[in-house]
Image (cartoon, helix red, strand yellow):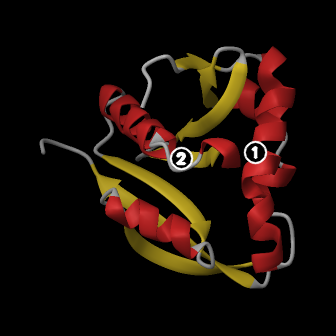
Amino acid sequence: MSEAFELRRATAADAAAARALTREAYAKWVPVIGREPKPMIADFDAAIRDHRVDLLCDGERVVALIETVAEPEALLIENVAVSPAWQGRGLGRRLMAHAERLAAAMGYGEIRLYTNARFVENVAFYRRLGYAITREAPYLGGRVAHMSKRLGAA
């Protein structure tokens, strides 16, 4: 992967680009679950204001993002989105590693995320990165898989 990608913190001016990227990235899941996934309807102005949103950019173009939320016991990954045109290039893996470094730097021993249990490719991706399903719960007629990973010396 080219090192030309810039990882930077989102600002209020990036909300529209973050929204468009997320809608594009999650569109493939609409037929799977019969509705727009939660990230597609998120308020990106609020997300950028209230959480940490980091953007991976190729020049001026936002090609991927990760949104994290500092919670009392762990860092939560709220959203990971990679533009379909840029998938398969290691960008999601790069963003996940970034979130794990953030969590460790903030003193957390654990990082968490959740995803729709029917997003089997995503669940498999997170498992390959060392995340385990800690529980499943009903959500809007489906199931949400809560996943976590302990951080520490490798």
Vertical side of 114 occupied by 19: above or below: above
Q: Quadrant of the C terminus?
A: top left
* Residue nearest the viewer, comparing 57 with 146: 57
**Camera-side mark, 1 or 2:** 1
Vertical arrangement, residue 81 with respect to residue 149, above or below: above
Query: Total number of numbered labels?
Result: 2
Looking at marks 1 and 2 on the same chain, the residue that comes earlier in the sequence is marked by 1
Residue at 53 percent of width and 79 percent of height = 136
Cα separation, mark 1 vs mark 2, equals 14 Å
Q: Residue at x 30, y 59 (%)?
A: 130
Q: Quadrant of the N terminus?
A: top left
Mark 1 crowdedness (10 Å alpha carbons): few <14, some 14-19, many ≥20: many
Whether residue 83 is visible, yes or no, is: no
Residue 118 horizontal/vertical position (percent):
63, 79
Which residue is painted at 73% across and 16% down in the image? 11
Per the image, the residue denoted by label 2 is: 77
Query: As shown in the figure, which amino acid type bears the numbered disc 1?
Result: Thr
Residue beneath disc 1: 22
Question: Which residue is pictured at 74% across the width and 34% down the height?
Answer: 47
Label 2 crowd bin: few (<14), some (14–19), many (20+), radius 10 Å = many
**Left or right of 17, for residue 78:** left
Mark 1 lies on a secondary structure that is helix
Tag 2 secondary structure:
strand
